[in-house]
Image: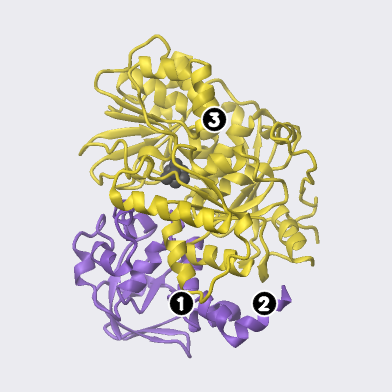
Amino acid sequence: MGIAHKFGDDINTDYIIASKRKRDTVDPKKLVRFLMEDIRPGFGGTVQPGDFLVAGENFGCGSAMEIAPMVVVGAGIQAVLAKSFARTFFRNAVNLGLLLVTCDTEQITGGDELALDLEQGLVRNLTRRVEIPFQPLPALMKKIVQAGGVIPFLESDEGRALLPLL
Amino acid sequence: MGQTISEKIFSSHVKREVTAGDILFTPLDLMMSNDASFPLVLEALQKIRGYTLKEARKLVLILDHYCPSPSQEVSRIHEDIKAFAHQFGCTLYAEGEGVCHQLIPEKGHIRPGHLVIGSDSHTTTYGALNAFATGVGSTDMAVAIHYGLLWFKVPLSIRIELNGNIPKGVYAKDISLHFIAKVTSRGANGLAVEFSGDTLGKLSMEGRLTICNMVMETGAKAGIMPADEVCRAWLKGKGITDILPVTPDSDAAYAREYTFDISSLEPQVATPHQVDNVHPISEVKGKKIAMAFLGTCTNGRLEDLAVAAQILKGKRIHPGVVLVIAPASRDVMLEACNRGYIQALVESGGMLNAPGCGPCVGALGGVPADGVNVISTANRNFIGRMGNVKASIYLASPATVAASCLTGEITDPREFL
Ligand code: SF4
C-alpha cells in the first residue's frame, strides 16, 4: 500500500530533477529533496517510501539522463503509474528495476491509497474502491525488472546464458 | 514483407532478419558519452564486478556541457573523465572542442548503416548520416561498454515526407518545428522516423543534422535520412568513401505517414513551455525579448553563424537584448573567425562563449533573469531549461534569433534578408 501523488501529462525529466541540481551531485539520495521542485516546490520533502507517482501521458519525456528515474528510485517510490511513458525513461526504469505500470490513471486522484497486484495485473484504488487493470511487461523486460535491473539480470545465471547467443 | 531502414540496420547487426517489435540483444558500432552523463555511467559500471571495458575503443568521451568548468566539483569530474579515457584508450574530446552531437559527425565517427548509442537524448542527430542513433541512459551505456551489446526493441517506423522548395527566410529549424507541431511531442514516442521527399536534397548536411536533432522532440527513438549525393560528398570530405547506404524496401510497413509541403512554409517559433507549441512567426512577432542565444547542437553550426552574421553585420543589436553565442565546435568557431562571422557577431554586440553547450541547460554562461523572454536556437524550451524557472524560452531559427536581436522583439527574419 502507498499514497498516490498525481501529476499531469508530459512530465519531463527536467521537471523530475532540474538539470542544475545534477551539476553538484549525482547522488540520488541527496537529490530526492529536489524531486519535482520546478513544478511542485517542496514535494521531495513530503514523499514517503512506498508511495506511488501517478501521471498522465508521456511520463519522463525529454532528456535521456538516468538521474531522473534514479531519483525516483532513491525516493523509495514503489511504482510509477501513467497512461504512457517516454521511451528513454521506460528503458532506464527497466534497467534500474523500477516498476512502471501503464494503465488508465483517470480513476486515481492525489492522496488516494493504492495497492498493486502484480499477479492479477491490477491496481487497486482502496480509497475509491475501484480496480484498474494493466498490461503486464513483455517477458524479457519483466525478468530484467524482477532481477533488480539489467546488470543484476546479466550477472544472473539466466542472463549469462543469454550472452553467448550473441 | 519489406523492411524499413531501422529493421535493416538491426538485421545486419544480429545477422538475421528481424521485424519491428522484436526484442533482442545486439552489438553496436559506436558509443558516445559526455561530462553530463558519464559520471553516472561510471557509477553504473561500479555495479559490474571487475568491469573490463571490452568495447573501450568504440567509446568516445566528450567534455561539452560544463566548459570551461564553473566549479571545483565539475573540474574534478573533468579530470576523472580524462583519466578514464587515458586508462582505457577511449577517444577523448576535451574542453573547448565542442558539443558532442557536432563533434561525432564532424570528426568522421559515423557511417551509413551504423548502430550508435549516446548517453544523451539528442544522439538522434547522427541519423542525418543514414545511421540508427539513439539516446540511452547510463546503465545502458555501462552495459554496452562492458558486455559489448545492448537490448533493444526494434521500433516501428513512421515516415515523414518533405516536399517542395525551401522559401527564403525558412530553414531546417522551421521545417523541424513545423513537423513537430503536427506529430506532437509524444506522437513518435518509441518509434523511428524515416525522412523522405525532394526537400531533403535541397538541404545541406548541417540542415539535416538540425532536423535529426529536433526529431527527438517528437519522442522518436531515431530519425533517419537516406544517404544521397550530398551525404556522400560530405563523408568524402572526411575521408570516408567505402559506404553502404541503407534504403527502405518499397513495401516496408510504416505505422503512419505524413506529407508536408515546405514551399508555403513561413518561419516558425516554438512558444513556452513545450517544443510542440509552435506558431508561425506572424502570430508571435512583436513579443519583447531580453536575451537571445545562438548556438547548441541544434543550430550552432557554420551555416547558422553565417546567416546570423549576415543579418547582424554592420548593425548594433537592440540595447535591451543580451546576445550569447556558443559555436558548436572549435572547428566551427575557427572557420567562423576566418570568414569574419565572429567579428560581425561580436561587433554587433554579441558575447562569445567557448564552443560547447553554453547556456542551453542553464549550467553556465548566460542564465536569464526572472520574467524575461529568451529567443534561442536550441531544441528545448521547458520551464527552467536555461536555469531560471521564471524565464520563458522561444525557439526559432538562427535567422529569426538574429533579426529579433536587432529589434528587441520577436521579428520575421525576412525583413532583414
Ligand atoms: S547543446 Fe543543449 S541539447 Fe545539445 S547536447 Fe548540449 S545541452 Fe544537450
- The tag on residue B331 is 3
Q: Which mark is residue A97?
A: 1
Amino acid type at mark 2: Leu
Between disc 1 and disc 3, the foreground one is 3
Secondary structure at badge 1 equals: loop
| Residue tagged 2 | A163
- Disc 1/disc 3 C-alpha distance (Å): 42 Å
Q: Quadrant of ligand 1?
A: top left
Q: Which chain is disc 2 placed on?
A: A
Q: Spatial distance from mark 2 to mark 1, Cα to Cα?
A: 20 Å
Which residue reaches farthest top?
A: B314
Q: Position of residue A117 (x, y in %)?
A: 42, 88
Residue A12 visible somewhere in the drawing: no
- Front in this rendered view, residue A25 or A114: A25
Q: Position of residue B47 (x, y in %)?
A: 47, 74
- As drawn, B313 above or below A148: above
Of all chains, the one bearing label 3 is B
Question: Where is residue B410 shown, x and y percent of the image?
Answer: 35, 26
As drawn, the label of residue B367 is none
